[in-house]
């Protein structure tokens, strides 16, 4: 059934959506009652039990042990015989960690040539060639011992006290920086904080420590560090304690703001956009509306030579064979699979599996397991080639679709994307996740109209219009692209207006 053929009022023909001709399930567009009839691909199916909107209705008889298919892919095996018209969910669908074959690329995909007509936005041109969509002063804690102090520093600057062309003074408090095992965990924290300090949306930065923590501020200072201009470091132990550090930091920030006053937005090619792709509070409509629409936007950006960065490694499990086929070359494919396999090993240390990822809210929204969730989540990256795969917080340098290794936990994932340098984030949600980031505008895209209306102050785009039959995937995708240009030029997102600024680095090792 084409989404544009769906009428607003439910009928037998439009009450359920089948996404692929080989699927043996359809998704209830509206709540289905026992005795109702749905018609899919000309075949009538009588509904046998209550099925909530977004949940799966069986289309053909499925024997115990047979595959249940959605998106043309297996999403698990039937625990028991399932009759047409029955509700398929966790009660009768088993997660199955099945082996899939990988089709590696045989030829190398070239980088796209820039188009003759390049869209532009008004942003801040940085010396290193990147572009800022905002111009903030960042105050970053080196450790938990400085977290309260950086909050105090940032909160002391009211909007009316800012200099011209300064969007704000934003704090980056966190609970890490000490009690770490020395090695990969401290390396990753330092990479994350360095990425925040040297972010294209940051015009000046301070790193604040206690003075005796594992994560010393000296690591971020000096001529050979990522940011050497407009960077200052302070410790509480050498600056007179909390109050003395606040006063010293405020004095330096006023000096920075005087220098930043001369920076103005200029016309910048849209190829300088680096858009992080994330989803949270997903539901079954995510893979029907918001995610494929965002995929259209991602493909449009990739064609311009901009970057669209897909995160959340656990939410690629079950779709990794599809992403491998899209890799630019064998090297990128192997690097991507290395992150998948490394994450499996990471989970095994704690007796976990990828199927621990779906939350109760995901389940309530109709997603039965991680395979089903991942197949919908991968749609955010559109259809273009995967040009690179990078680790958590690693600087993104490649144009096109790029994969970043992050957890599925939203604040940690967004922190990795931001540390990698994305200057905007697009975030799809079915259940209504309320999240933002201190210095990166986050565009919220609702997967269904009900969530959009219930959380209107949080949502920027209603992709639920696709399910309602009021817009196509392509139309909403272009709407997201157009909004990206406006936001890049300074238009505030809902998350920015509400003041959301969650920042949580990924702690991977033990606490000592």
Image: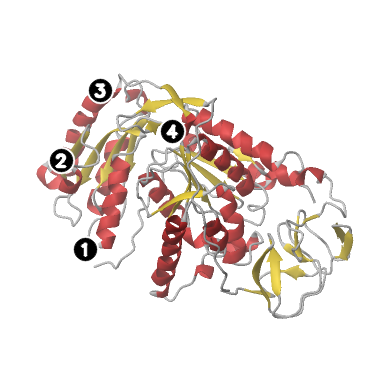
Dot 2 lies on which element?
loop
Residue highlighted by disc 3:
259
Q: With respect to residue 49, does 5 lie above or below?
A: above
Foreground: 234 or 305? 305
Residue 35 position by quadrant: bottom right
Residue highlighted by disc 4:
272
Residue 131 position by quadrant: top left
Position of residue 66 measured from the top left corner of the image (x, y, whole percent) = 71, 77
Position of residue 265 measured from the top left corner of the image (x, y, whole percent) = 40, 22
**Spatial distance from mark 3 to mark 1, Cα to Cα?**
37 Å
Q: Specify whether 442 is left or right of 163.
A: right
Foreground: 128 or 425? 128
At 46% from the left and 27% from the top, the residue drawn is 269
Residue 432 seen in the current view: no
Dot 3 lies on which element?
helix
Point out the tag, 1 or 4, that comes first from the N-terminus: 1
């Amino acid at each position: 059934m084409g989404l544009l053929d769906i009428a607003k009022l439910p009928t037998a023909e439009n009450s359920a959506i089948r996404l692929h001709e080989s699927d043996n399930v359809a998704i209830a567009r509206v709540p289905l009652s026992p005795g109702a009839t749905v018609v899919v691909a000309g075949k009538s199916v009588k509904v046998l039990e209550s099925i909530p909107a977004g949940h799966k209705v069986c289309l053909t008889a499925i024997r115990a042990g047979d595959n249940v298919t959605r998106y043309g892919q297996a999403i698990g095996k039937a625990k028991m015989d399932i009759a047409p018209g029955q509700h398929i969910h966790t009660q009768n669908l088993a997660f199955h960690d099945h082996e899939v074959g990988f089709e590696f690329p045989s030829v190398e995909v070239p980088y796209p040539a820039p188009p003759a007509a390049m869209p532009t936005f008004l942003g801040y041109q940085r010396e290193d060639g990147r572009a800022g969509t905002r111009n903030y002063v960042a105050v970053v804690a080196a450790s938990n011992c400085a977290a309260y102090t950086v909050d105090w520093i940032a909160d002391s600057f009211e909007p009316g006290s800012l200099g011209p062309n300064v969007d704000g003074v934003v704090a980056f408090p966190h609970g890490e920086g000490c009690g770490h095992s020395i090695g990969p965990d401290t390396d990753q924290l330092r990479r994350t904080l360095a990425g925040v300090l040297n972010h294209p949306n940051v015009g000046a930065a301070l790193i604040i420590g206690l003075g005796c923590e594992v994560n010393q501020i000296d690591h971020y200072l000096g001529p050979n560090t990522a940011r050497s201009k407009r960077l200052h470091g302070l410790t509480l132990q050498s600056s007179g304690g909390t109050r003395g550090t606040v006063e010293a930091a405020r004095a330096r920030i006023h000096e920075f703001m005087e220098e930043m006053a001369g920076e103005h937005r200029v016309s910048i090619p849209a190829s300088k956009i680096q858009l992080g792709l994330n989803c949270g509070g997903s539901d079954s409509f995510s893979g029907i509306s918001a995610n494929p629409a965002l995929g259209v936007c991602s493909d449009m950006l990739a064609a311009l030579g901009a970057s669209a960065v897909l995160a959340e490694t656990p939410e690629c499990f079950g779709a990794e064979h599809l992403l491998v086929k899209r890799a630019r070359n064998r090297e990128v494919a192997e690097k991507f699979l290395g992150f998948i396999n490394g994450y499996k090993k990471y989970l095994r240390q704690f007796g976990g599996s990828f199927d621990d990822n779906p939350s109760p809210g995901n389940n309530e929204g109709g997603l039965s397991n991680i395979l089903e969730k991942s197949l919908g989540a991968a749609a955010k990256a559109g259809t273009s080639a995967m040009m690179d795969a990078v680790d958590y917080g690693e600087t993104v340098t490649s144009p096109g679709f790029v994969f970043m290794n992050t957890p599925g936990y939203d604040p940690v994932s967004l922190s990795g994307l931001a540390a990698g340098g994305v200057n905007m984030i697009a975030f799809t949600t079915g259940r209504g996740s309320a999240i933002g980031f201190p210095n990166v505008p986050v565009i919220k895209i609702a997967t269904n109209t009900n969530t959009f209306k219930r959380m209107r102050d949080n949502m920027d785009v209603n992709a639920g219009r696709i399910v309602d039959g009021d817009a196509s995937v392509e139309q909403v995708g272009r709407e997201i692209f157009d909004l990206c240009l406006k936001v890049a030029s300074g238009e505030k997102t809902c998350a920015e207006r509400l003041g959301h600024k969650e920042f949580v680095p990924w702690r991977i090792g033990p606490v000592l």
